[in-house]
Image (tube, rainbow, N blue to C red):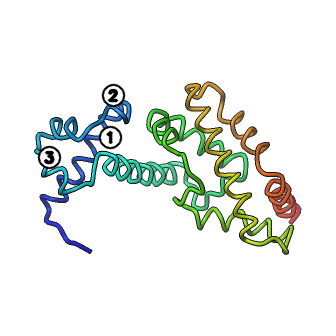
Amino acid sequence: MQKHNKHWDKTHRALQEIVFDLLKKYSVEKITVQLVCDTANINRSTFYAHYLDVYDLIDTTQKNKREALFSEFVRQSHVSKITFFDQSSLIIFLNFIKENGWFYKIVLKLRDSFPIQEGFDRLFDLLLTPVKRYDPKMSSQKFLYYFIAFQAGFTMILRHWSDTNYSQSSPQIATIIFDSLPYLIRISLNKVYQKNENN
């Protein structure tokens, strides 16, 4: 891994903060390398020493901000294990998205391919375990298709919610998400939670 000095690191982080602020004012299409350079008071060669292009900068910024926001969500909600598959924890998560609405509106608009790799292994295993209990013969490859359907549906629901300026309540959206789960995942999760409630 290439090492950089403190000045390089400071500039690298500063460019992310600058583009984060620009995203509040401009659409992604309107943000250019020149605009970033003018705002940061640097030349283009300095910019390209840090990022391949403006999309690389935006992607890196979004990834880091998502991680920072999610860490803050965990801290605020005092939830050590977030499953998103019970009503209360999902509502907490949806409230957090709504509170940071402008940022997630940008993130959701750029979601166009599935499966989403961020948090993939954890979420995949979380869903696969109850389904395997319900249907032990199901292959992981077949389940991947159910998983992609879940991710795509979840994301599109959130995107539409953001497009309508989060007009519906978090509990309403949580209910819609649960009702939209692929059938096999939904009945498998229901059986697991029913079993846990009876124990």
Split into 4 quadrants, where in the image is the C terminus?
bottom right
53 lies left or right of 123 = left
Disc 1 and disc 2 in contact, CB within 8 angstroms: no
When asked about the image quadrant of residue 163, the answer is top right
Circle 2 Cα neighbour tier, 10 Å, few/some/many (<14 / 14–19 / ≥20)? few
Q: Which residue is mark 1?
A: 20
Q: Position of residue 121 (x, y in %)?
A: 59, 67
Amino acid type shown at disc 1: Phe
Mark 1 secondary-structure assignment: helix
Q: Residues within 10 Å of mark 3 (few under 14, many from 20)?
A: few
Q: Earlier in the sequence, mark 1 or mark 2?
A: 1
Callout 2, which amino acid? Lys
Name the kind of residue labelled 3 in the image: Arg
Identify residue for label 3. 44
The image quarter in which residue 142 lies: bottom right
Task: Report the label total.
Answer: 3
Q: Residues within 10 Å of mark 1 (few under 14, many from 20)?
A: some
Label 3: state its secondary structure. helix
Q: CA distance from mark 1 to mark 3?
A: 19 Å
Query: 173 or 155: nearer the eye?
Result: 155
Q: Residue at x 54, y 35 (%)?
A: 98
**Residue 100 circle label:** none
Q: 114 or 20, which is in the foreground?
A: 114
Residue placed under numbered mark 2 in the picture: 25
